[in-house]
Image (tube, helix red, strand yellow):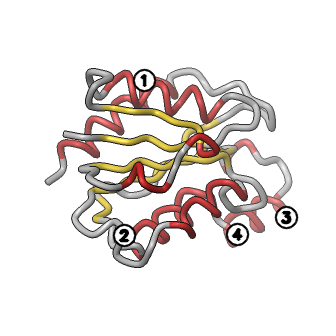
Amino acid sequence: MKILIVYDSIFGNTEQIAQAISNSLGSKEHVETLRVNDVKIEKITGLDFLIVGSPTRGFRPTKAITNFLKRISTNGLKGVKVAAFDTRFSLSDIESSVLSTIVKIGGYAATSIANRLKKNGGNLTVPPEGFLVTGEEGPLKEGELERAADWAKTAIKVQ
């Protein structure tokens, strides 16, 4: 199985999640993990599985991830299994009720990524997932790396 994990990271938290996912999925000959700026669009050709992740910035993925997703042609992911993740604050950690309501309405990056992957013909195997940080710059909450590894294994096993 040929798997590509594409991510963007600002403070290193999303990169840690991408690496945990990669490490849980097997040998490096089958799994490649690349920062979005290092990905040539041709890399998606012949993939069995594409996983895309981004920090949530203003309720959306980073501009680099958004641009990467836009470069994938309509039906460019036909027959490819896909999954999406982000890093984010937990709603329970947002002290302001106004900000919490805005976040509920605005959403998170993973949903936007998943929608774009599906629009490009990908077969979403699991719902988009968010991995939690303790502050804007992190670090990740305890247990998130293990949770990411488990999520990835579930995503790959779903047929």
Amino acid type of the residue that numbered disc 4 sits on in the rendered structure = Gly
Alpha-carbon neighbours of circle 3 within 10 Å: few (<14), some, or many (≥20)? Answer: few
Earlier in the chain: of badge 3 and badge 4, it is 3
Q: Secondary structure at mark 4?
A: helix
Q: Secondary structure at mark 2?
A: loop
Q: Indicate whether 2 appears above or below 24.
A: below
Residue 93 appears at what percent x and percent y?
A: 73, 42
Q: Residues under labels 3 and 2: Cα distance?
A: 40 Å
Q: Are marks 3 and 1 in contact (CB under 8 Å)?
A: no
Q: Secondary structure at mark 1?
A: helix
For the N terminus, the image quarter is: top left
Residue at position x 57%, y 21% from top?
142
Which residue lies under the disc numbered 2?
76
Which residue lies under the disc numbered 1?
146
Q: Are marks 1 and 2 in contact (CB under 8 Å)?
A: no
Q: Residues under labels 1 and 2: Cα distance?
A: 31 Å
Earlier in the chain: of badge 2 and badge 4, it is 2
Alpha-carbon neighbours of circle 1 within 10 Å: few (<14), some, or many (≥20)? Answer: some
Which residue lies under the disc numbered 3?
98
Which residue lies under the disc numbered 4?
106
Amino acid type of the residue that numbered disc 2 sits on in the rendered structure = Gly
Q: Secondary structure at mark 3?
A: helix
Earlier in the chain: of badge 3 and badge 1, it is 3
